[in-house]
Structure formats: structure tokens, C-alpha cells
Amino acid sequence: MAENKKRIHMLDEIRGFAILCMIFHHMFLDIGDVLGLSWGYRVFDALCTVQPLFWAIFIIISGICSRLSRNTVKRGVIVLACGGAITFVTAVIMPLLNFAQCEIYFGILHCLGVCMIITGILMPLFRKIDYRIGAVISIILFMFFYGIEEGGLCFGLITLPESMYRYNFTAPLGFHGSNFYSADYFPIIPWIFVFFFGSFVGKIAEDERLPEVMYKKHCKFLSFTGRNSLWVYLAHQPVLYAVMLVISLIIN
């Protein structure tokens, strides 16, 4: 954060809670993959219905923080580099260890990194736009482009031509072939508009006009998790796999 800004501890706590929910969700996938218990897959699939809500919260908070960061572009480069490291581990290293279908080619970190870089570059323009107008336009654009991964717009009301979905190199934008697979997939479109929404409403946080309760720390654990969310995200899957492997050895 910029040195002259008060830390908004509640944003850290909400982000920490969202990260913990994500870890809880992924735990059931590991129960199916590592322990071979089919009910883990069923619980994981059931929780997929609410997963986008927590990621939307996480992306919005990241957008808000883009208004408070000393260098949003630099943060974006770091996050994108971490996403590249995850791609290397999941697409190169893990298959060598006989882990199948774990490749992540454009996940949440890739998406966030690109969103930060683009927002950081556009921030001088964003500051000239009324934040309320920008926030409304961002919501409209998100709703318009939602469903692009499935071949449509406006939640599938408008069908896009199949010719747009021939190649996988456009997957970061939301267009990909039928053989594309990424265990974690967050295309830039439409999620960048959620990030833009956070960036615009972040004007309120930048002006320090949030309720006073948001500047107070309520839970040290959630606050710590939220402040270190990048490293928690990078560490959670190896830790979960290790725990599951130990449990598997004990059971067997």
C-alpha cells in the first residue's frame, strides 16, 4: 500500500476468508485424487456452484487494492510470474510424478497478474472517470461478456461463431478449442471487468471514506492470511497433497 494510506484491515480479513474457503474447496478434490474416495469429488462438484462468488469477492478486493498500491504494474508482473511458475510445476513436473490432469495454463494468478498490469497502465485514465459511472459500466460489460467461455454472450443469450473457438492460444481471452484443459481457468474476459469494478469503487477506499469499522482489525488470523494471500495460495496445494499422502500411508 501507499505509505500515506491507512490499512483497511477488513479487506485483508475478507480476502483471507475467501482464500480459506478456496482451500476448503480444493481439499475435497485432493481427497478424491490422493485418497481415492469418490465422495470427495461429489462434495467438490457441489461446492463449485458457490466458488465463483468467493473468487469474485477476491478479484474485487484485488481491484480495490490497485487504487491503494504504490505500483500496481509491478505487483501484476510478480503475480503473473507466480502463475507461470504454477504452469511449469503442474504441466511439466507433476506429470513426471504420475499426476494426471493437473495442468494449469491460465488460472486465477495469471488472470490477476494481467488485470493488475492492464489496470495499472490504465489508472491515469480511470482517475478521470467518475467512479460510479465506471463501476456501472464494468458491471454491464461483465454481464454482457459472461458466458464467453461457453461460446456465448449475455449468459448464453447470444451465440458466437464456432470459428472463434478453433485455437487454444486465445484461451487467456476466453476463446479456446474443444481439447483445451486447465485445472484452474480464469480467462481475462469477463473477469477483468470484475477487477475494473473493484478498481473504480476503490476510489472510496483511496479517499478514506469507508466506515471506520473497516479500518479496525477483528481477526488476526484472517488478517494475516489476507495480507499474505499470494503465498498462502502458492503453498496450499503442496501442503494439502502432503497431508493427504500422510493420511493415505496411515490408512494403508
Image (cartoon, grey):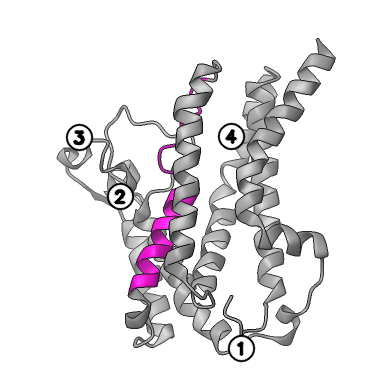
Do tag 3 and tag 4 residues touch (Cβ < 8 Å)? Answer: no
Label 2, label 4: how many angstroms apart (C-alpha)? 25 Å
Q: Is residue 135 above or below residue 111?
A: below
Residue on which the image places disc 4:
45
Q: Which quadrant of the figure has residue 99? A: top right
Task: Classify mark 1: residues with Cα within 10 Å, few (<14), some (14-19) or many (20+).
Answer: some
Residue 166, which numbered label? 3
Residue on which the image places disc 2:
173
Q: Amino acid at mark 1?
A: Glu
Label 2, label 1: how many angstroms apart (C-alpha)? 34 Å
Magenta residues (range): 100-121
Left-right relation of 139 to 59: left
Q: Nearer the viewer, mark 1 or mark 3?
A: 1
Q: Nearer the viewer, mark 2 or mark 4?
A: 2
Q: Main secondary structure of the magenta part?
A: helix
Q: Nearer the viewer, mark 1 or mark 4?
A: 1
Q: Amino acid at mark 3?
A: Arg
Do tag 2 and tag 3 residues touch (Cβ < 8 Å)? Answer: no
> Which residue is pictured at 32% across the width and 81% down the height?
125
Residue 200, which numbered label? none
Q: Nearer the viewer, mark 3 or mark 4?
A: 3
First of labels 3, 4 by sequence position: 4
Q: Is residue 147 above or below residue 182?
A: below
Callout 1: helix, strand or loop? loop
Q: Is residue 111 magenta?
A: yes
